[in-house]
Amino acid sequence: MAMLIQLITSFIAAMGFGIIFNAPKESLWKCGFVGMLGWMTYILITAQGVDEVPATVAAAFLIAIVSQVYAKVYKAPIIIYIVAGIIPLVPGGMAYNAMRNFVTNDYITALSLAAKAFMISGSIAMGIVFSEVVNQLLKQSRLKRIG
Amino acid sequence: MNLEQSIEKQYDIMDVSLLAGKIMLESGAETYRVEDTMMRIAASYGIKESHSYVTPTGIMFSIETEEPTKTKLMRISDRTTDLKKVMLVNSTSRRISNGELDVPQAYRILKQIDRSEETYSLKIRIGAASIASGCFLLMFQGSTADFIPAVITGGIGFMSVVYFQQLISIKFFAEFMASFIIGLLALLFIQLGIGQELDKIIIGSVMPLVPGLLITNAVRDLMAGHLISGLSKGAEAFLTAFAIGSGIAVVVTFL
């Protein structure tokens, strides 16, 4: 049941972000799907007791791969799909907790939370870059086969 | 074709490329996509060599021909997020590359895209922001009792960021005020006994303001070698995050 709620809410939240960013109407379902896929990957991996950082890398990687496929199939800029998918992974809650500890003068906790939030942002970037690398490699191998 | 006409034509091509670049940059496309689109458009109209330099606040574009190099500069002052325009310009540039559009036609189509209204009305976007806030609350393991408070706070938070931005065009101030209002409302719900967890409500409602697009674009720009754009977008994202954080912090510390 809890899983079902996560599935539905992440789908709707990613679609909502599509609307906030004025994504084209026909791409909203895909935005929702990409968001759901990324969030479920993240949830399932962290549920196994794995740290948030590798889980975020894996989720961002998957989001970027699926977005690339969508971008290729529908001939649209990849950013439309990637953004909605990435949003749930952004460590907003952690950054908030860090900020909260900063203002209550608990600097040690605040710093460790901030460092964690920074690491997670970095791992989102890493996931995206990895998928770009895979994409370029595929493109090159295809070019070689033709040439 | 005499010299005068050919110079005229080259300026027209530049105008088309620059307009395409301007729309894309104002709508939140990545820097490398803007540069790529502008050079592709120029190339498909027969300009062999063109250079573009794009930063979040301005575009420089120059083309090399037999005559002396021509350069134009365009200042970009406001940037919003409108992914539909990015897609429309992208498909127009595809059509130009396929040779389907001549210069005046392309210019007309791009002008139309530039003037077109946003896809969703403000009401729909506020609605989407409030529902997304509620969903984020549930995603972050908040209790279902807090769903309604998060929906209301998230909606009002998003509304106030739009309102304050129209009032005073300082993004930092708008975001600060919006998150301050979110903090106040969340606190109010707790005091009234409607909400249960202050932290969860605030985190859920703040999510529509989080600079997700900026962060993604900053990283993609940095990786593509557009260091200045990447860094300045990163700075913008950091400022936004700081505004949100300090708005909430004021509520948490003083109330």
Image (spheres, coloured by chain):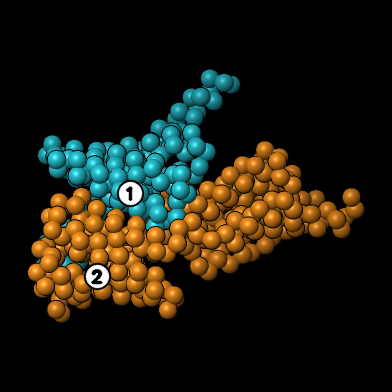
Residue B158 in the image, given as x and y percentages of width and height: 33, 66
**Mark 1 residue type:** Ala
Q: Quadrant of residue B18?
A: bottom right
Task: Confirm whether residue A86 shows in the render.
Answer: no
Question: Which residue lies at the image location 74% right of the left edge and 53% below the top edge?
Answer: B104
Question: On the image, which quarter does residue A52 sit in?
Answer: top left
- CA–CA distance between discs 2 and 1? 21 Å
The numbered mark at residue B45 is none
Name the outermost residue toward the right. B2
Chain B's colour?
orange
Same chain, labels 2 and 1: no
Quadrant showing the C terminus of chain B: bottom left
Q: Is residue B167 left or right of residue A11?
A: right
Q: Residues within 10 Å of mark 2 (few under 14, many from 20)?
A: many
- Contact flag, marks 2 and 1 (Cβ < 8 Å): no
Q: Residue B159: horizontal and vertical position, in percent?
A: 35, 69
Point out which mark residue B182 bears.
Answer: 2
Residue at mark 1: chain: A
Q: Could you tell me the amino acid type at mark 2?
A: Ile
Q: Chain of mark 2?
A: B
For the point 10% across and 63% down, the residue is: B196
Mark 1 element type: helix
The answer to whether residue A11 is left or right of residue B236 is: left
- Report the residue marked by disc 1: A14
Instruction: Specify the chain shown as cyan.
Output: A
